[in-house]
Amino acid sequence: MAFKHNDSCLVKVADDEPIFVLRAQDLLAPAIVEFWCVAARAQGCPERRIEEARSTAEQMRSWAREHGGGKFPD
């Protein structure tokens, strides 16, 4: 799972590369990550990456529960 200061993926982002960040406080984030898993599997993404993403979706749900639910993005 990635956190704000330990995500090696973010280090690889080009300065002019658009990105889209999902936060655990976003009510839609876990479902979006799970949809990504379905699409990734259909495209032949390595299973290890898919399982990491599924784990992140579950951790997002847990975080939201522990922090009072969640909300729609600002």
Image (cartoon, grey):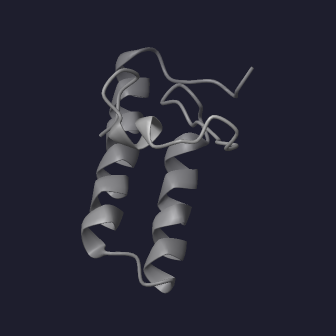
Residue lying farthest top? 67
Where residue 52 appears, as percent x and y from the top left, is 29, 55
Residue 32 in the image: above or below residue 43: above
Residue placed at 48% from the left, 59% from the top? 34
Would residue 50 be found to the left or right of residue 37 on screen? Answer: left
Where residue 6 appears, as percent x and y from the top left, is 30, 27
Q: Which quadrant holds residue 20?
A: top right
* Location of the C terminus (image quadrant): top right
* Location of the N terminus (image quadrant): top left
Residue placed at 49% from the left, 46% from the top? 30
Residue placed at 55% from the left, 64% from the top? 35
Residue lying farthest left? 48
Where residue 33 appears, as percent x and y from the top left, is 50, 53
Where residue 49 appears, as percent x and y from the top left, is 32, 63
Would residue 73 be found to the left or right of residue 35 on screen? Answer: right
Residue placed at 45% from the left, 66% from the top? 37
Residue lying farthest right? 74
Residue 35 in the image: above or below residue 38: above
Q: How many marks?
A: 0
